[in-house]
Image (cartoon, rainbow, N blue to C red):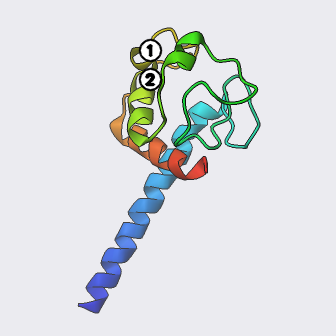
Amino acid sequence: MRNLLIAGLLCLAAAGAAAQDLGKKAFEQCAACHSLKAGENGVGPTLHGLLGSTAGTVEGFRFSGPMKRSGIVWDEKTLTEFLRNPQAVVPNTRMPFSGMTDEAELKALVAYLATATR
């Protein structure tokens, strides 16, 4: 029984690591414009401190009016909806990303960002 429990825990750890790897790989699409480092804006704003922040408020970045007025507070749910279809969530946002359709990749990316943006 103990060996079965250990095997189960190892499987969960492996699955978590695989999801983290998928999320990190998915972030490569984002990294062309976004940094995870505090204060490091590029074509897009830094994502450091993303969860819990209000959309359009990163210091030193020029956001579109629609993004600033959106009132979105980023959490895993709002981030998932936005990354699935940015223009549907914030019409006329400047973010030139058409959205992520692969649900497993999207879920992994959001989970990765939840830890990598702290």
Q: Residue 67, how many percent across, how many down?
A: 54, 18
Q: In which quarter of the image is residue 32?
A: top right
Q: What residue type is labelled 1?
A: Gln
Judged left or right of residue 111, residue 50 is right
Q: Residue 5, how many percent across, how many down?
A: 29, 83
Farthest residue, direction top? 92
Image quarter in which the N terminus is found? bottom left
Q: Quadrant of residue 6?
A: bottom left
The disc at residue 99 is 2
Real-space Cα separation, disc 1 to disc 2, in angstroms: 8 Å
Residue 100 appears in the picture as rendered: no
How many marks on residues?
2
Residue 86 versus residue 24 in the image, above or below = above
Q: What element carries label 1?
A: helix
The disc at residue 87 is 1
Q: Which amino acid does label 2 sit on?
A: Gly
Judged left or right of residue 19, residue 55 is right
The residue lying at 39 percent from left, 43 percent from top is: 107
**Which of marks 2 and 1 precedes in the sequence?**
1
Q: Are marks 1 and 2 in contact (CB under 8 Å)?
A: yes
Q: Nearer the viewer, residue 97 or 44?
A: 44
The residue lying at 49 percent from left, 36 percent from top is: 74
Q: Residue 104, how many percent across, how many down?
A: 36, 42
The residue lying at 72 percent from left, 23 percent from top is: 61
Query: For mark 2, does the 10 Å Cα neighbourhood hold few (<14), some (14 to 19), or many (20 or more) residues?
Result: some
Residue 64 appears in the picture as rendered: yes
Q: What element carries label 2?
A: loop
Farthest residue, direction bottom? 2
Q: Which of 116 and 29 is in front in this view?
A: 116
Query: For mark 1, does the 10 Å Cα neighbourhood hold few (<14), some (14 to 19), or many (20 or more) residues?
Result: some
